[in-house]
Image (cartoon, helix red, strand yellow):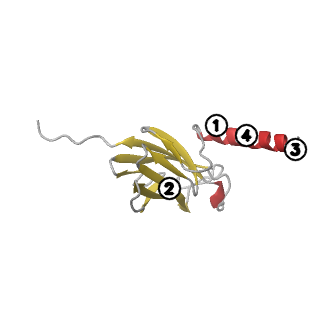
Amino acid sequence: MRTVLGLTALLLASAGCRESLGTRAVSGPPFEVASPAEVVLKIGQEARIDALLRLDFLGVPADSRCPAMVECFWAGDAAVALGLSLGMGPTFPDTLHTTLDPKSVQFGGYTITLVEVKPYPQVPGPIPQGDYAARFKIERSPTLRGPS
């Protein structure tokens, strides 16, 4: 009975997380989706898109976003560290931002855009790395056309 209650609480907590981010939360081993897609990753998680592109959420090296109840001169920015690779190829690091550029990157025929970083700061001070989740939009890059 205790196990059932624990599993129910875990499912309810994860459902709340999905709702707050507006899309499906990712947990467990890497998962595969087809593009275009939006994925939510916690730090240390990865997604595989079209069985080709691998997107790893490595961390939030900087978060200067203005807390919700504080009046700030500037809204601030959160930087998200990624690892990108194709197939079994090497991983290339990159960083995307919430308010500064770049907000998106083109890699291997895909455009990866940072949509949001949660949680939003409520009070001044650091957010524990384990609390972060980021929503990414992944699309195939438009094919470049030559002269007609």
* Tag 3–tag 4 contact (CB < 8 Å): no
Q: Name the residue under label 3.
A: 2
The mark lying in front, picked from 2 and 1, is 2
Q: In this view, does 21 lie to the left or right of 144?
A: right
Q: Earlier in the sequence, mark 2 or mark 4?
A: 4
Nearest the eye: 49 or 21: 49
The mark lying in front, picked from 3 and 1, is 3
Q: Mark 2 points at which residue?
A: 56
Give SS at disc 4: helix
Q: Name the residue under label 1.
A: 19
Q: Which of marks 3 and 4 is nearer the N terminus?
A: 3
Q: Which of marks 1 and 4 is nearer the N terminus?
A: 4
* Tag 3–tag 2 contact (CB < 8 Å): no
Residue sitting at x 43%, y 45% = 51
Whether residue 6 is visible, yes or no, is yes
Residue type beneath disc 2:
Asp
Task: Report, in whole angstroms, how far the alpha carbon at label 3 lies from the one at label 1.
Answer: 26 Å
Give SS at disc 3: helix
